Structure formats: C-alpha cells, structure tokens
Amino acid sequence: MTDHSPQIDSLNAACIAEVTLPAEALFFANTMATFPQFAGTLWPYRTNAGSIHSVLRMNSSEQDVIDSDGSGDPTVNSIHHMNSANGQHLYDLDTTFTATSPFQTASADQLTLLTATGTADSWTVVLWASSPEVIEACQRATEGAELSWDIQDLYRSKPYNPLAALTPVQRETMTTAFEVGYFDIPRTVSMEELAGELGVTPNAVSERLRRAEAHLLAELLSESSTGSGTL
C-alpha cells in the first residue's frame, strides 16, 4: 500500500483538508460498485513490520460480498476479516490507490490519508498535506482525469502567523511600536518618539504602519471569508 498512513511526528503540517471524491479516485472502487449497500470507514496504520495497512469498519451484514469481491479488487493486495459484532465488521486491508487517483502525484512526505468514509459511489477523506499547494496540485489532477472533487473544509494544522504577510521592515516597525507602547491606551510614546527609536522620519513610520495594518487586515479578512481555520 502506498505510504499514506499518519506520520505522528510530522503533524506540524501546513494544512488538513476534508475532500469528497468519487470511488474510482481512491481505492476499493470495483467492490463498492457491485455492492450498493456499501458503507464503511477506513483508518490507515503502520504494522509492526513497517508496512502500511488499513482497518475498514463496515455497517453492512453482507460479509460474504466483501470477502469475495474485495479479494478480487485490483486495488486490494490482501483482505482479512478480523471481527464481527453488533452488525459491524472489521477488516484488515493492504491496498493501493487506483491508477487514476489524484493522490498518485504526491509523495508520502507531501500527503497523508488520515481517514476515509465511503459509500457505494464516493469517499470523503481527511488529508494531511505539507502545503495548500499540494492539495491544489491533486485537485488539478482530478480535472485532467475528469473526476469530481469537492473540498469540504481546509484547516491550517499549525499556528497561523498573520505577520508572515508583512515585509521585514513592516514587521520590525509593528513589533517596535508594540514593545515601546505606541499601541497602548493611552499611548506612552508619540509618533515622533517611535520614529526616533527606529531612526527614520515620522512620515516613514506612519506609512509603514498604515501599510502593515492594511496587509494584516486583508490577511485576516481573507482567512475568515474562505472558511479556513487553525487546528
């Protein structure tokens, strides 16, 4: 199975995405297509030997269908029934992505599948990605393969620092202004005193602050309007 299990020591990744894809974009598609009642949740894990498997939990009672069709699915290297209880079944799977999967374009250190919930025709997956650009690249791959792709949510999985949108000079100006009390209420230093602290003219300080504030406001408003957040 392609290495898409969670790497616990690297969960300081850039983003977490929840995406809905057709069955043929992931794996188990043939089995799902012949089993309209299919409904299950899959969790990848690393075995003691270091290989990547997944646990599949199904709510269906038709165990024979999965045992017969699952073993013949081209994306399934092996399937093993582990346990049944209260109408649910647990399987151990060794799988690979389909040839048309958009995730084939990303390496293990760029993309990790955390969990997947499937129905007869689609998967909703939660992904760890090293950057939003990796998600975008996978989405472009689905366009080329004419596969539908629906991003439900996109979250940053490490603390988001809006100061990253500022230039070094703007960050220095904002940081110094904050530290010396320019933003205190009431202010403890004047614009002229702040300018002297930075070694520039008051007009230069005023322009830096206005540009920095405009960048910060634009970044924060963009963050809230897109629905993305921080985990």
Image (cartoon, helix red, strand yellow):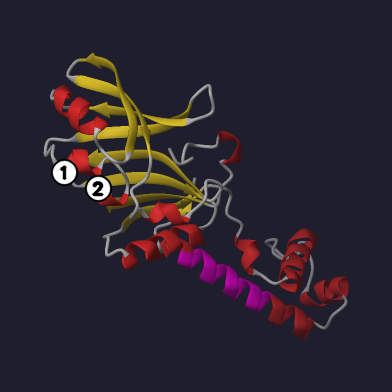
Judged left or right of residue 181, residue 130 is: left
Judged left or right of residue 196, residue 130 is: left
Residue 103 percent across, percent down from the top left? 41, 52
Q: Earlier in the sequence, mark 2 or mark 1?
A: 2
Residue for badge 1: 33
Q: Residues within 10 Å of mark 1 (few under 14, many from 20)?
A: some
Asked whether the viewer can see residue 62, the reply is yes
Residue 72 percent across, percent down from the top left? 24, 34
Q: Which residue occupies the foreground of this view, 117 or 32? A: 32
Judged left or right of residue 90, residue 195 is: right
SS under mark 2:
helix
Q: Which residue is located at x 28 percent, y 27 percent?
A: 57
Q: Which residue is located at x 29 percent, y 41 percent?
A: 74
Residue 50: image quadrant is top right
Q: Which residue occupies the foreground of this view, 31 or 148? A: 31
Q: Are circles 2 and 1 on residues that touch, CB within 8 Å? A: yes
Residue 186: image quadrant is bottom right
Residue for badge 2: 23
Q: Main secondary structure of the magenta part?
A: helix
Q: Quadrant of the N terminus?
A: top left
Q: Which residues are magenta?
A: 209-222
Give above or below for 102 relative to 157. Answer: below
Give above or below for 89 relative to 186. Answer: above
SS under mark 1:
helix
Cα gap from disc 2 to disc 1, whole angstroms: 8 Å
Asked whether the viewer can see residue 22, the reply is no
Give above or below for 72 relative to 197. Answer: above
Q: Magenta segment: does it hold 125?
A: no
Q: Residues within 10 Å of mark 2 (few under 14, many from 20)?
A: many
Give the residue type that dot 1 points to. Ala
Give above or below for 75 relative to 152. Answer: above
Residue 133 percent across, percent down from the top left? 50, 62
